[in-house]
Image (cartoon, coloured by chain):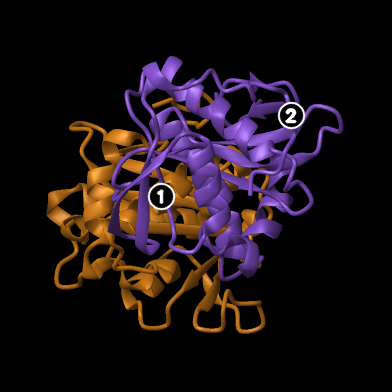
Chain colours: A purple, B orange
Amino acid sequence: MTLTQAPELETPRLILRGPEPQDIEPMIEFLLDKDRAGGFGAAANRGEAWRWFVLNVGHWHIHGYGYFTIEMKDTGKTAGITGIWNPEGWPEPELGWVVFDGFEGKGIAYEAAARARRYAYEDLSFDTLTSNIVPGNSRSIALAERLGASFEREYENIHMGHDLLYRHPGPDTTPDGDDDDGSVEAYA
Amino acid sequence: MTTYPDIPVIETRRLVLRGPEVGDYPDFKATFASYRSRFMGGPLNGYEAWMLYAAEIGHWAVRGFGMWMIHDKETDETYGMAGGWFPAKWPEREIAWIIWPDKAGKGYALEATHAVRRHFYERQGWEAAVSYIDPKNLDSIRLAERLGCTKDHDAATIDGSDAVYRHPAPSAAASGQLRDGIELEIDHYCDPMFKPKGMPID
């Protein structure tokens, strides 16, 4: 039995699937890394990190969507997460992404986030999407811009504090998500 | 909301326990926004309460057990939650409960927790359980004692600020003396003639 009823999505190099028990440790490792997870919301301890994993499972059950695990097709390794996030207090449903240590600079976040965005527009019938980025997270800002999103406003996030809201192009103006030239350039 | 077909439904004299559902969230949120939640990590803002509720649901999927929502058998109204809780930081599997502030004093926590403990022991093969209780949470300590728990001074705590109450082992919990005593107390709550008076007890 799987933990969620998330669909399985595919890109040229990646599988996006629901969170499963084998993702717990990589996720905890990421959330405990204050440097890498700062822009996402680092966990203070292992208990808090574990709780984030289970609440993402609960998010899938409550909303019918949440963060996918990004799995590499060639090695089966967990490369990060991407998906749609919408807890209470959030300004709007958000497209988010995280790439784990060792998987950066390969265009994985772009490929995964673009696919998750297409899923939100085509399968969930969203008509707009945002990304919330903490000031100074230049890598995420670069990726948001590469995805065609543009800065809309600053606001106070209930969890993250001062935050930047980027808005993505709508369903009608979004490219289909596959990296057009198939290249693997770094996103930042 | 996708429900879990494998969350068992537990019925007691006055209550039915089911998995947490989206529609039950407002009562949960109100309780965790209130002073009532001060011994359970609260009070929480809306974001924190929602994230905790999502974790309650995810815990079921990841652990195969979790906290049930306590409903009135007749009206379906919710009274609180009771069940098992075992996040990564916990030394042992915990039996936990919370009753909405305006539903306390009717024995619902006793009735629900007695039933979930029996479920864990007899259906899920648990051989031990504890409850981690803030030493200032006198109502919960009293409930633990009514359930036959004893303070375990040697057991590991969550973070040093909680006391560990150890539940009677399955054989002791199934013994006539303890079980009959708990069930007699529940009977008294059910019968208006015998409603205990004067103590704000769960």
- Identify whether A182 is placed above or below A94: above
Q: Quadrant of residue A78?
A: top right
Q: Quadrant of residue B64?
A: top right
Q: Is residue B58 left or right of residue B181?
A: right
Which amino acid, by three-letter code, is at mark 2?
A: Ser
- If the image is split into quadrants, where does the N terminus of chain B sit? top left
- If the image is split into quadrants, where does the C terminus of chain B sit? bottom left
Q: Is residue B9 left or right of residue B59?
A: left
Q: Position of residue B14 (x, y in %)?
A: 27, 39
Query: How many labels were placed on the picture?
Result: 2
Which amino acid, by three-letter code, is at mark 1?
A: Asn
Q: What residue appears at the point 69 percent right and 37 percent down from the top-left corner? A: A108
The residue indicated by pointer 2 is: A183
Q: Which labelled disc corresponds to residue B93?
A: none
Helix or strand or loop: what does disc 2 sit on? loop
Q: Earlier in the sequence, mark 2 or mark 1?
A: 1
Callout 2 crowding tier (Cα within 10 Å): few <14, some 14–19, many ≥20? few
Callout 1 crowding tier (Cα within 10 Å): few <14, some 14–19, many ≥20? many
Helix or strand or loop: what does disc 1 sit on? strand
The residue indicated by pointer 1 is: A132
Q: Is residue A16 left or right of residue B150?
A: right
Q: Position of residue B153 (x, y in %)?
A: 61, 84
> B18 or A17: which is nearer to us?
A17
Q: Position of residue B174 (x, y in %)?
A: 57, 51
Subunit that carries the residue with mark 1:
A
> Quick check: do tags 2 and 1 share a chain?
yes
Q: Quadrant of residue B101?
A: bottom left
Q: CA distance from mark 2 to mark 1?
A: 27 Å
Q: What residue appears at the point 64 percent right and 25 percent down from the top-left corner? A: A179
